[in-house]
Image (tube, rainbow, N blue to C red):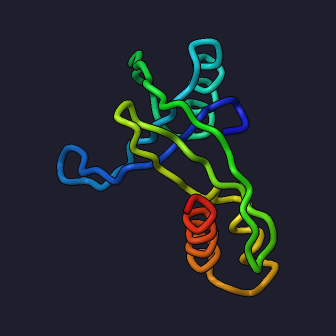
Amino acid sequence: MDAGALDAWATPITMKKGRPGLTISALATAARSAEVGEVLLRETSSLGLRRVPVSRVELPRHWVEVGTRFGLLPVKVSTEGGGTEHAKPEFDPCLRAARAHGVPVRVVVAEALAAYLVRKG
């Protein structure tokens, strides 16, 4: 992620001869793909990597701050073409609030979403 990946993850796989392994995946812009690839080759035991161009479709979005007993928290709101709204509390601020208040992060996320739904009416 420090090299500029937009996201990265590991997927468990079974390699030839039944050996366990991992596929390491990363999403990066074309401008950062070489740097991300260099880091993957330097930091893993892999002898090569595959690059696959992908495209992305994003829904329009905006952020709304909601008040909770854990403080103000941002909620990302997107709207589908048919007008259906999706709301998702931002994870990192919810995690910080959960740690500060000694509660599970799922409690903070649920309260932030509930506060958004009440605000929305």
Residue 121, percent from left and from top: 55, 63
Residue 77, percent from left and from top: 57, 46
Total numbered labels:
0
User: Residue sitting at 24 percent across and 51 percent down?
Assistant: 14
Furthest-left residue in this view: 17
Q: Relative to 91, does residue 96 appear above or below in the rendering?
A: below
In the shown orientation, is residue 16 left or right of residue 21? Answer: left
User: Residue sitting at 34 percent across and 54 percent down?
Assistant: 12
Furthest-front residue in this view: 121
Front residue of 95/28: it is: 95
User: Residue sitting at 55 percent across and 55 percent down?
Assistant: 88
Front residue of 91/61: it is: 61
Rendering quarter of residue 73: bottom right
Furthest-top residue in this view: 31
Front residue of 76/95: it is: 76
Residue 109, percent from left and from top: 59, 70
User: Residue sitting at 56 percent across and 30 percent down?
Assistant: 41
Q: Relative to 42, does residue 9 appear above or below in the rendering?
A: below
Q: Relative to 106, does residue 32 appear above or below in the rendering?
A: above
Residue 117, percent from left and from top: 55, 64
Q: Quadrant of the N terminus?
A: top right
In the shown orientation, is residue 54 left or right of residue 110? Answer: left
Rendering quarter of residue 71: bottom right
In the shown orientation, is residue 65 left or right of residue 52? Answer: right
